[in-house]
Amino acid sequence: MSMTRHDIIMKWTAYLLAMALVTVVNYYVLGPLPIALPQLLPILAVAGGTLEGASFGAIYGGACGAVMSSLGYLGPGCIISLSVFGWLAGLVTQYLLRRDVWGHLICSVVTALIWELWTVGARLISHTAPLEVLLRVALPELLWTLALALPVYWAGRFCCVNYGRIYHE
């Protein structure tokens, strides 16, 4: 059964509202707390790819990256990287893993590790801080990101289940 234009608009609206919710929780609820700031938008991009497929994941990841970029993260590099994360999660869960919570968790762990390694590596190369200092920030950030990967998945899954899948196998 093919989705109508109205169905697709409703699905995208739901996913964009999920993105707004995750952004508010990540940066305006958790941000002021004395904890390491998790990186939930890359995980949401992965959820979009896991649940809806590679092309949706790429577009949704780009939108998540645009939001992160507007909040001061990496500029266009953030848009491209989150788009790639969403696209790859869609491909991996289509051909190697299942399109379920386990596929999402595996893709989320890989994404979070790549994100933290990239961030630490870039700051290490630019001599921003010594490795010990960077790891004191990156490890708690990684743990908080992974601890919140399931609630982020559930936000995406709500959109997927209640508004139908876009991809066709």
Image: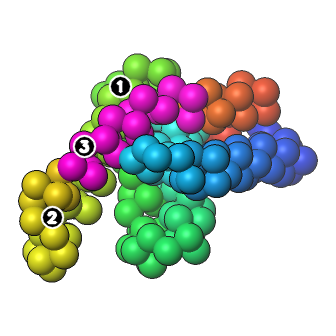
Question: Residue 54, can we see it?
Answer: no
Nearest the viewer among 106 and 10 is 106
Magenta segment's dominant SS is helix
| Residue 137 coordinates in the image, percent (x, y) | 27, 52
The numbered mark, 3 or 2, whose residue comes first in the sequence reads 2
- Position of 121 compared to 74: left or right? left
Q: Secondary structure at mark 2?
A: helix
Label pair 1/2, CB-CB below 8 angstroms: no
Identify the magenta region: 136-152
Local packing at callout 1 (Cα closer than 10 Å; few below 14, some 14-19, many 20+) is some
Residue 144, above or below 130: above
The kind of residue on which mark 1 rests is Leu
Q: Secondary structure at mark 1?
A: loop
Q: Position of residue 90 (x, y in %)?
A: 45, 41
* Residue at numbered disc 3: 139
Spot occupied by residue 151 in the image (x, y as percentages of width and height)? 57, 29
Residue under numbered circle 1 = 97
* Count of numbered labels shown in the rendering: 3
Give the label, 1 or 2, closer to the camera.
2
Horizontal side of 66 relative to 134 (left or right) equals right
Residue type beneath disc 2? Gly
Marks 3 and 2, how far apart at CA: 13 Å
The amino acid beneath tag 3 is Leu
Q: Which residue shows up at 56% across the image and 53% down it?
A: 32
First-in-chain label (1 vs 2): 1
Cα separation between marks 1 and 3: 26 Å
Residue at the limit of the structure toward the front, as seen here: 34
Of pointers 1 and 3, the one earlier in the residue sequence:
1
Q: CA distance from mark 1 to mark 2?
A: 29 Å
Crowding near the residue tagged with mark 3, few <14, some 14–19, many ≥20 C-alpha atoms within 10 Å? some
Quarter of the image for residue 130 reads bottom left
Residue behind mark 2: 121
